[in-house]
Image (cartoon, rainbow, N blue to C red):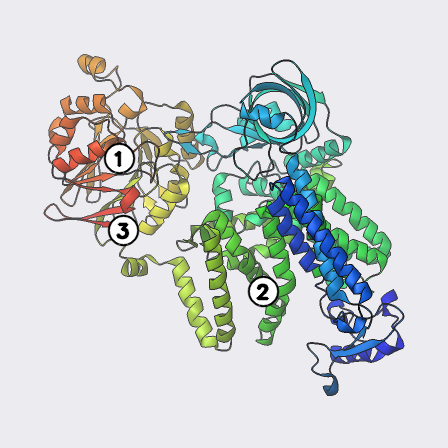
């Protein structure tokens, strides 16, 4: 074993060294830095103070900032002057070993070793080091520096002509410099269609020409929104190709540091507190001129990232999407469905590059952090005979390349700063302590870029790292004392500690708490390192030997596929998560619950039987076996015949057709919501999916219906508009080899005790009677909705899709008109809008009217006039926006309805 320059101790410290060695149980002692003395926390208060100050002062008035800075500087000066004039004996001594020639020393016991008289560990404390006062002065100086830095960065949003022009919504010609990778917005349903897809780019406005022709040089951070064409639900789920290939636009090829000349309309920032002075909206058709090529470094980074994408092109869909995100943060190929699964299981940190990636790469070079400066250190560096200082230089170059290629996201910056501090300590021969390194990284980053103080990503990154450095070692030791295998104890403690500290913040962002986060992170941990290492190897070899890169990427696809399977399996569990208040009050409540659980867990660990009982109860809560769930929750009710799922502003209903079998009518706008509904109903087999028409609020959730279920066929309307969503349905069916048929009036089917008849739409014009083709032909997607008359256990159901009055009146005149009278259950047309035919409501005279609508929807659905008209006919009206999911049971004589 070897010692660095600090291992040569003054004679006064030799008893302390002997005590430390004796406690280690080895003749020469242990070389782990944590056994050299207590953790140095002196940089923690300055880091936290600077962090809080930066977050508060970014948009504070200048006079406030000046006041805070002046007060802190004066107070720091007073503290330092008082220190000089005072006596050293009036203050506490720093709990560190002396680094040089001595002076007087104070003997004090360490925490673990008991008292000095009992042979505990002894530390020599320098008599003249008065750290409390200097630490107070350092805290005040850091607060002053953070206030000034935050004020200067915040002023960038208010400086120059851009903010004023944004308030006027002016159209300008500007020269911008791109500062991030372009990214596509996620597909989302807006009403009955998919919202238009846009390209988002962060940039700095460097020059702007006002409408009067004057040009002004400036520097203002902006968000550029490029309209890339109308969105398509084909991109919404399980898209076999990345979104960028379905939306070819030159904007997706631009690299950071590229300078462009554009014509755009300025608008104020979307929200307060963002690092954005304005929003620039660019039309895709508008001319875009490249006036400055990207830098050589960014071109190299772009080439490496492009090489990795090419190397992963032939892989399975999950691996093709995950590897670029895991290695370099390229998430363009990750589908919303996969993204949602990772969020549900709290594995979202693995979707994009994070500090763990840099840790894995540096560990290859220098070995585990605790062994980095020992002779016994591991990694490639000692095997290649590389000295400590040269190793540090290599590590610094590797860190810099990592930041450039992976882009300076908050977690990447935090990891890079921590690594840089550790490498600097390694190069100078000083002992490393990871907590001071983390505090130093936070302090330097917040002073350099105060906007990080408001970044949730930065907060989560620091919390996770802090948990791994503080809680995880103690919890791991506690588990090992209870005979848990060491590797399992370390992995379990790391996952639980990170979850404990990060869960309250995640709850603020998602309003949900994952119950499967710890086991899913445990299962994912085995795959992250090999996927990262092989992915980086493919990245490095792609420009030189693409076949080798493809082989490496193929090897990395196995652990990447494992990650995706873990995420999907965990998210598919009925009790994967629970809803939680998405506010800081909710975060405080969750933190309190976590503390209670940890304290109770410490006691439970002494009683293995109670641990087993709690684990079994948690397993039941997560898996939620259908028989047990029905007993506990009463959902679904016994003998249910029909269910209306709560899918927000859309339609999704299910008819029971046997044990675990159901006929699904419409899929709603969200795959997650319909999938969850079908799971709670216990539906695993679907002989038929009926899509009444192709509006997104009825078909965009189709992947959730198909996920993990045996589907016999899909039946749709013959009116294939909107075209893009009709194509989406056909692609989904083709990918799973599910036949697609068209429904026509008069068609009858039966499945078990369930039978139904299609009432609408009429046959296509060539085969329809001439008078019907001319007068009753549907106009538009809504009037082409498939309308069903269903019988089940003596109950009569009428499902009207989104029919509007013209089609409703035509339906009354059709041969199916006599079937419309006196139904038991009516699925009200078009979410209960005011656009209804009164005669159809009178003819149907339902006993129960069900309306599917989203809470607080902008359309006013259901309309009060429609609800009143239904009640005037004696119907009981229930709605999903108020009553949640609804299930109908009973027979013709007795009708029962239950809510989830």
**With 573 as the anchor, is 290 left or right in this view?**
right
Q: Are marks 2 and 3 in contact (CB under 8 Å)?
A: no
Disc number for residue 659: 3
| Lower sequence index among marks 2 and 3 | 2
Residue under circle 1? 862
Q: Is 7 left, or right, of 774 in this rendering?
A: right
Residue pointed to by mark 2: 493
Place of residue 94 in the rendered image (x, y in percent of width and height, measured from the top left): 76, 69
Residue at the farthest bottom position = 117
Residue 244 position, x and y percent, is 56, 30
- Location of residue 482 in the rendering, given as x and y in whole percent from the top left corner: 57, 76
Among the 4 quarters of the image, the one containing residue 15: bottom right
The kind of secondary structure element at disc 2 is: helix
Out of 7 and 116, give the one closest to the viewer. Answer: 116
- Judged by depth in the image, the label closer to the viewer, 3 or 1, is 1
Crowding around mark 1 (Cα neighbors within 10 Å: few <14, some 14 to 19, many 20+) is many
Q: Earlier in the sequence, mark 2 or mark 1?
A: 2
Location of residue 612 by image quarter:
bottom left
The residue mark sitting in front, 2 or 3, is 2
Residue 290: mark in rendering: none
């Amino acid at each position: 074993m070897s010692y660095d320059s600090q291992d040569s101790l003054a004679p006064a410290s030799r008893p302390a060294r002997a005590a430390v060695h004796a406690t280690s149980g080895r003749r020469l002692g242990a070389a782990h830095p944590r056994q050299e003395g207590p953790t140095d926390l002196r940089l923690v208060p300055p880091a936290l103070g600077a962090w809080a100050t930066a977050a508060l002062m970014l948009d504070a008035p200048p006079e406030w900032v000046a006041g805070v800075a002046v007060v802190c500087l004066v107070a720091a000066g007073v503290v330092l002057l008082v220190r000089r004039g005072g006596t050293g004996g009036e203050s506490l001594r720093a709990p560190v070993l002396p680094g040089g020639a001595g002076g007087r020393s104070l003997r004090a016991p360490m925490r673990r070793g008991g008292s000095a008289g009992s042979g505990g560990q002894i530390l020599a404390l320098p008599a003249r080091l008065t750290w409390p006062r200097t630490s107070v002065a350092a805290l005040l100086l850091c607060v002053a520096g953070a206030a000034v830095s935050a004020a200067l960065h915040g002023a960038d949003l208010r400086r120059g002509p851009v903010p004023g022009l944004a308030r006027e919504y002016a159209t300008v010609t500007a020269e911008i410099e791109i500062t991030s990778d372009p990214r596509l917005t996620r597909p989302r349903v807006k009403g009955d269609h998919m919202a238009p897809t846009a390209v988002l780019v962060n940039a700095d406005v460097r020059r702007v020409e006002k409408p009067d022709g004057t040009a002004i040089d400036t520097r203002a951070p902006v968000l550029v929104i490029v309209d890339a064409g109308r969105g398509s639900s084909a991109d919404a789920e399980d898209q076999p190709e990345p979104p960028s290939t379905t939306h070819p636009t030159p904007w997706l090829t631009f690299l950071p540091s590229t300078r462009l000349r554009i014509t755009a309309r300025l608008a104020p920032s979307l929200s307060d507190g963002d690092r954005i002075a304005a929003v620039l909206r660019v039309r895709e058709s508008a001319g875009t001129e490249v006036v400055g090529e990207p830098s050589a470094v960014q071109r190299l980074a772009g080439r490496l990232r492009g090489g990795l994408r090419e190397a992963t092109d032939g892989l399975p869909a999950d691996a093709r999407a995950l590897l670029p995100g895991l290695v370099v943060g390229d998430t363009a190929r990750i589908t919303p469905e996969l993204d949602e699964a990772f969020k549900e299981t709290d594995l979202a940190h693995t979707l994009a590059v994070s500090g763990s990636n840099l840790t894995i790469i540096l560990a290859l070079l220098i070995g585990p952090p605790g062994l980095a400066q020992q002779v016994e250190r591991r990694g490639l560096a000692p095997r290649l005979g590389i000295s400590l200082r040269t190793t540090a230089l290599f590590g610094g170059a590797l860190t810099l390349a990592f930041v450039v290629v992976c882009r300076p996201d908050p977690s990447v910056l935090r990891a890079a700063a921590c690594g840089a501090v550790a490498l600097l300590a390694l190069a100078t021969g000083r002992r490393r302590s990871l907590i001071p390194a983390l505090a130093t990284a936070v302090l330097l980053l917040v002073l350099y870029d105060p906007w990080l103080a408001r970044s949730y990503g930065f907060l989560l990154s620091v919390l996770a790292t802090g948990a791994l450095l503080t809680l995880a070692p103690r919890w791991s030791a506690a588990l090992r004392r209870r005979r848990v295998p060491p590797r399992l104890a370390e992995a379990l403690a790391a996952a639980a500690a990170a979850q404990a500290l990060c869960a309250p913040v995640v709850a603020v962002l998602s309003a949900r708490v994952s119950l499967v986060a710890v086991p899913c992170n445990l299962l994912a941990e085995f795959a992250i390192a090999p996927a990262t290492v092989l992915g980086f190897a493919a990245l490095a070899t792609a420009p030189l030997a693409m076949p080798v890169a493809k082989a490496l990427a193929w090897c990395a696809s196995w652990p990447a596929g494992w990650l995706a399977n873990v995420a999907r399996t965990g998210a598919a569990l009925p009790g994967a998560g629970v809803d939680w208040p998405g506010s800081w009050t909710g975060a405080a409540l969750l933190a309190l619950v976590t503390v209670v659980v940890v304290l109770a867990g410490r006691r439970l660990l002494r009683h293995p039987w109670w641990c087993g009982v709690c684990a079994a109860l948690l397993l039941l809560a997560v898996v939620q076996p259908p028989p047990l769930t029905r007993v506990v929750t009463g959902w679904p009710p016994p003998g249910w015949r029909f269910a209306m799922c709560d899918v927000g502003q859309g339609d999704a209903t299910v008819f029971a057709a046997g044990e675990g079998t159901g006929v699904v009518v419409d899929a709603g706008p969200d795959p997650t919501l319909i999938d969850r509904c079908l799971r709670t109903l216990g539906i695993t087999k679907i002989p038929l999916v009926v899509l009444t028409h192709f509006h997104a609020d009825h078909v965009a959730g189709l992947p959730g219906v198909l996920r993990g279920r045996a589907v016999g066929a899909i039946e749709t309307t013959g009116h294939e508009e909107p075209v893009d969503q009709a194509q989406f349905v056909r692609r989904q069916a083709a990918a799973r080899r599910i036949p697609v048929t068209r429904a026509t009036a008069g068609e009858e089917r039966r499945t078990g005790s369930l039978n139904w008849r299609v009432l609408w739409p009429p046959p296509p014009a060539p085969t329809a009677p001439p008078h019907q083709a001319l007068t009753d032909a549907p106009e538009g997607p809504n009037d082409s909705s498939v309308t069903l008359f269903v019988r089940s256990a003596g109950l009569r159901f009428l499902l009207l899709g989104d029919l509007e009055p013209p089609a409703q009146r035509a339906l009354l005149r059709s041969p199916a008109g006599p079937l419309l009278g006196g139904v038991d259950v009516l699925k009200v047309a078009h979410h209960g809008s005011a656009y209804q035919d009164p005669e159809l409501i009178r003819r149907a005279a339902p006993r129960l009217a069900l309306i599917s609508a989203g809470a607080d929807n902008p359309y006013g659905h259901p309309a009060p006039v429609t609800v009143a008209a239904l009640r005037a006919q004696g119907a009981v009206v229930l709605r999903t926006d108020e009553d949640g999911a609804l299930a109908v049971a009973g027979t013709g004589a007795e009708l029962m309805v239950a809510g989830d």
